[in-house]
Amino acid sequence: MRSIRKFAYAAVLSFSMFSIQPTPAAAEEAHGSFTLSHEVHWQNCVLRPGDYAFTLKSSGPPTLLTLRGLNGTGTDAMLLVSDIESPKTPEASKLVLVSRGGQSFVSTMELPEYEMTLRFAVPPETPTK
């Protein structure tokens, strides 16, 4: 009798754990790929030249952007996105880079097919003397 009670308790506990987990189908997901021709800084990450795939998952704030190198090395970066806007013009998808001190930084990722533009932090421009 005691073992049946333990089994029932474990079954109910297991079922309740699965029922409170978020389902991937409920979250919005955007994905795609891009190629970097040179080293690029993306918030606090530095990405080497090469081919990358991205996945953007959002079930409400915050949104998680995962960047994965396509050469089999696994996940290269996971970034939290806090600023998402609607695109201003329905152009093709693109990464917008800015130059600071001879280095490239990602400032925006425009994804019109998903009706969003992601903004990222870049260092401030230093005044020239």
Image (spheres, rainbow, N blue to C red):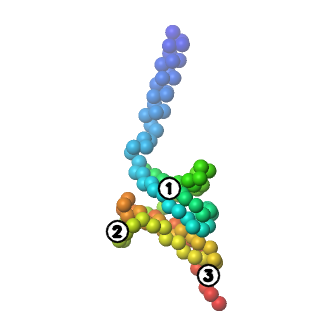
Q: Amino acid at mark 1?
A: Phe
Q: Residue at the far top: name it.
A: 1
Residue 115 horizontal side relative to residue 102, left or right: left
Query: What's the residue at 51%, 23% (across, down)?
Result: 10
Disc 1 is placed on an element classified as strand
C-alpha gap between disc 2 and disc 3: 32 Å
Residue 2, above or below 20: above
Where does residue 47 sit, x and y in percent of width and height?
Answer: 61, 62
- Residues packed near mark 2 inside 10 Å, few (<14), some (14 to 19) or many (20 plus): few
Q: Disc 3 marks which residue?
A: 126
Q: Disc 2 marks which residue?
A: 90
Q: Residues at badges 2 and 3 in contact (C-beta under 8 Å)?
A: no
Residue 91 visible (yes or no) = yes
Q: Disc 1 marks which residue?
A: 54
Residue 85 horizontal side relative to residue 124, left or right: left
C-alpha gap between disc 2 and disc 1: 20 Å
Disc 3 is placed on an element classified as loop
Query: What's the residue at 56%, 53% (across, down)?
Result: 70
Q: Residue at the far bottom: name it.
A: 129
Q: Amino acid at mark 2?
A: Pro
- Residues packed near mark 3 inside 10 Å, few (<14), some (14 to 19) or many (20 plus): few
Q: Residue at the far left: name it.
A: 90
Query: What's the residue at 51%, 9% (across, down)?
Result: 1
Q: Residues at badges 3 and 1 in contact (C-beta under 8 Å)?
A: no
Where does residue 92 sit, x and y in percent of width and height?
Answer: 39, 67
Dot 2 or dot 1: first in sequence order is 1
Where does residue 59 sit, x and y in percent of width and height?
Answer: 42, 50
Where does residue 96 sit, x and y in percent of width and height?
Answer: 49, 71
